[in-house]
Image: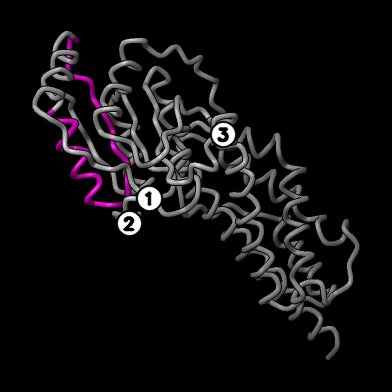
Amino acid sequence: MELEDEKLPKIIPVGDEQISTIKAMTHDMAEPPRILVVDDDAGVRSTLQDVLESAGFRVNTAANVGQALSLINTEHFDVLLSDLHMPNAGDGFTVVSAMRHTNPRAVTLVFTGYPALQAAMDAILLQADEILVKPMPIPDLLALIHAKLQKGQSHAKANPERVAAILEREAIATVREWLSRVNREDELTCISLNDEQRTGHLPKLLEELISRLRVVPQELGTKHVSDAAAQHGRVRFQQGYSLPMIVEESRILQVSIFDTLQKNLSDVDFSLLLHDVMTIADEVDSQLKQTINGFMGQSAWQRRTAA
């Protein structure tokens, strides 16, 4: 985000007396509290790190969601301070959700530059302890962090679900989402099919994907044979599809799967999320290859029989 007053927490100079007061608060604790600052603006990260370290906190910073998730999975933190948009809307809540699953007792604070949305977000909170509207004076921020730490957090840790369990539970919704997206593509709807003809292959392909996600450890680059994918290719050839149309259907399947995970992000087990996502991409691509092979095989067979 840009370093502008209307968008950022205003970095108000902190006096020596205020710093001494905050240091006295943290000095009484067994260990200096650890804070993770997540913001895509280097200037904001640097300034907040300097201020917080001056106040006696130990600070780590992250420039994006990926860096934040990596730190959350490997380090312990007492406080999360995250921007909401980095740069995508709601990125901050992805980080909050990960912190909730990994360290449910951590204080989680999210900054937003849109005061008009505070009431709505306060009603939702999406697992954050507090939504803070920019600009917020640094002394007030330090006092809030201390108060939250003194009060202590007692969030009940939800039982995180593996990606496989979520996709199995939401399989019907994923198929519906896929069909909805396909029906908006003229490239695909130019061939008239009913819903069953268009989606009939998906339950089996999703079942194969879910089965692979349940294998631990997962190996990428698998040569798993998918009879369902090959049969799908043969059927699509008979229905008059082209290879680009098959590729587009596969792309939409990946988008629909990731949309399902996004909608269930608060339930996701983040400890294996990255590898699960890579496995999804690997399996869907493998299925696509076998669908194309089935398509080409059916085409060759039809040419031979017509000769």
Q: Quadrant of residue 223?
A: bottom right
Which is nearer the eye, 193 or 176? 176
Do tag 2 and tag 1 residues touch (Cβ < 8 Å)?
yes
- Tell me which residue sits at (40%, 27%) in the image: 108
Q: Quadrant of residue 250?
A: bottom right
- Kind of residue indicated by mark 2: Glu
Marks 1 and 3, the one that precedes in the sequence: 1
- Tell me which residue sits at (30%, 29%) in the image: 141
Residue corresponding to mark 2: 2
Which region shows up in magenta?
A: 29-54
- Kind of residue indicated by mark 1: Lys
Sort mark 3 into few (<14), some (14-19) or many (20+) by Cα contacts within 10 Å: few
- Residue 10 vs 24, above or below: the answer is below
Place of residue 140 in the rendered image (x, y in percent of width and height, measured from the top left): 29, 27
Residue 124 relative to residue 277: left or right = right
Quadrant of the rendering where the N terminus is positioned = bottom left
Disc 2, SS: loop
Marks 3 and 2, the one that precedes in the sequence: 2
Residue corresponding to mark 1: 7
- The disc at residue 119 is 3
- Kind of residue indicated by mark 3: Ala
Q: Quadrant of residue 266?
A: top right
Which is nearer the eye, 183 or 210? 183
- Tell me which residue sits at (8%, 27%) in the image: 16
Residue 154 relative to residue 19: left or right = right
